[in-house]
Image: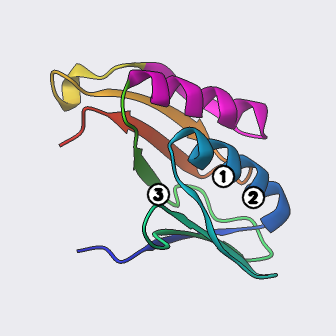
Amino acid sequence: MIVHIAFEVSDLARSARFYDAIFHALGARRMFETDGAIAYGRDHEQVWIVARGRTPGPGYGHMALAAAGRAAVNGAHEAGLANGGRDDGAPGPRPQYGTNYYAGYLLDPDGLRVELAAGAH
């Protein structure tokens, strides 16, 4: 149903370091790059990071990224923190979303919320 999703960011180079790190930890890669945008995916460009030139407004929303398991959630969370992200919920079980749901949350360099999830349906 979804072809792609895009986050508009204030500093593309700064955001690229963050997203390169978490997507690498999740087994995806940068598949497209221009001066104004980068895109990530496995088979095709699914997540776009686009230069906006100003900070997104508060409460902009969030995106949830699928991880292969708990170790991938933990690794992507650590990679995000090491590359300009901020913690917004340490990795752990989230039984309110299902018995096998395990997730961690980050804020990207612009404060956009990124969920790293395993066990999602």
Q: CA distance from mark 3 to mark 2?
A: 19 Å
- In the displayed structure, 25 sits above or below 111; it is above
Q: Residues within 10 Å of mark 1 (few under 14, many from 20)?
A: many
User: Quick one: which residue is furthest to the top in this view?
Assistant: 92
Please check the rendered image and state whether residue 93 is part of the magenta-colored stretch, yes or no.
no
Q: Nearer the viewer, mark 1 or mark 3?
A: 1
SS class, disc 2: helix
Q: Quadrant of the N terminus?
A: bottom left
Q: Please state the horizontal and vertical placement of residue 53, each as a whole percent of the image.
A: 80, 76
Residue 92 at least partly seen: yes
Drawn side of residue 71 relative to residue 12, left or right: left
Disc 3 designates what residue? Answer: 61
Q: CA distance from mark 1 to mark 3?
A: 17 Å
Q: Residues within 10 Å of mark 3 (few under 14, many from 20)?
A: few
Q: Residue at x 82, y 81 (%)?
A: 35
Q: Amino acid at mark 1?
A: Tyr
Magenta region, residue range: 70-91
Q: Please state the horizontal and vertical placement of residue 69, each as a whole percent of the image.
A: 36, 28
- In the displayed structure, 77 sits above or below 65; it is above
Disc 2 designates what residue? Answer: 16
Q: Which mark is residue 99?
A: none
Drawn side of residue 67 relative to residue 77, left or right: left
SS class, disc 3: loop
SS class, disc 1: helix
Disc 1 designates what residue? Answer: 19
- In the displayed structure, 103 sits above or below 41; it is above
Q: Residue at x 65, y 26 (%)?
A: 78
Residue 11 at least partly seen: no
